[in-house]
Amino acid sequence: MPRVFISHLSDDNLRLGVYIDRLLEDLDNKIDLWIDTPEHIRPEYGSYSRIKAIPPGTKWGRNIDGAVEDAACVLVFWSANFGKKSDRSIFIGEVDDARSRRLCVQVAIDPMDGWEIPSPFNRDQILEVSRLDMPGDASKFRRAIERVNDLISAPEKKGQPIEVEVYLLPYHRSAARGSGTRSDRCGEDRVLRVALDAGLEDLG
């Protein structure tokens, strides 16, 4: 079952309930959420079947790393508390890992005045959704949820290799990245089959 990792600052726990409720309502019922300690957001979340968390008695860091790695998408909640928090390494690591895998959707739950989202994260489109009771912010959060759905449903998200055929002209020398086999017969068209792990941008 696909899972959305919720990346947030612990200082924002009491503010996230309205966003989690909207996610549970708008995402497909077959999609789970992963929150490190959901009962810190709302006590009832600890017993929700669609919300997964760190199992009691297990390693905190190892569970977070594994949950980010297994997630179909990571939804990041930035806030003005980011600038006030001294140790942000875990949060930054979650966002950085998700961005490197192109599975990251970012929103800001505070107006972006008087604080900054650091580079390189601020180079991405980040939707300000500080007031879900306002039509504009509610609409933007729906767009964020739609993007989450897109990432989960995209076939390339699983990192499955694809195979392409590259036709080489006779006697043409070419270097290609990847693993595969080719015909060594000279004077004929040759076919090079390459398994790509990421996407067409890896051709070169």
Image: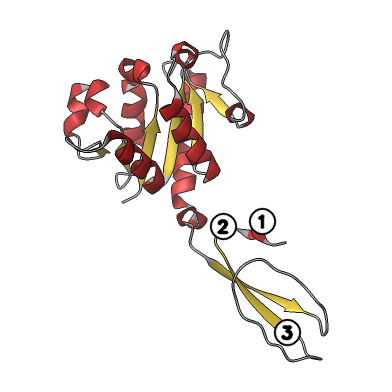
| Residue that mark 3 sits on | 190
Whole-angstrom CA distance, mark 3 to mark 1, is 22 Å
Numbered disc total:
3
3 or 2: tag closer to the N-terminus: 3
Whole-angstrom CA distance, mark 1 to mark 2, is 8 Å
Task: Look at label 1 and name its amino acid.
Answer: Glu
3 or 1: tag closer to the N-terminus: 3
Q: Nearer the viewer, residue 186 or 8?
A: 186
Residue 63 is situated, as x and y percent measured from the top left of the image, at 30, 40
| Quarter of the view holding residue 172 | bottom right
Residue 18 is situated, as x and y percent measured from the top left of the image, at 34, 21
Asked if the residue under mark 2 is in contact with the one under mark 1, i.e. CB atoms within 8 Å, the reply is yes
11 vs 55, left or right, is right
| Residue that mark 2 sits on | 198
Q: Relative to residue 121, is residue 202 depicted above or below?
A: below
Residue at point 81%, 81% (across, down):
169
Asked if the residue under mark 1 is in contact with the one under mark 3, i.e. CB atoms within 8 Å, the reply is no
| Quarter of the view holding residue 22 | top left
Q: Residues within 10 Å of mark 3 (few under 14, many from 20)?
A: some
Let me know if residue 71 appears in the view. Answer: yes
For label 1, the SS is: helix
Let me know if residue 142 appears in the view. Answer: no
| Residue that mark 1 sits on | 201
Rendering colour mode: secondary structure
Residue at point 32%, 34% (across, down):
25
Q: Nearer the viewer, residue 46 or 93?
A: 93
For label 3, the SS is: strand
Task: Look at label 2 and name its amino acid.
Answer: Ala
For label 2, the SS is: loop
40 vs 141, left or right, is left
Q: Residues within 10 Å of mark 2 (few under 14, many from 20)?
A: some
Task: Look at label 3 and name its amino acid.
Answer: Arg
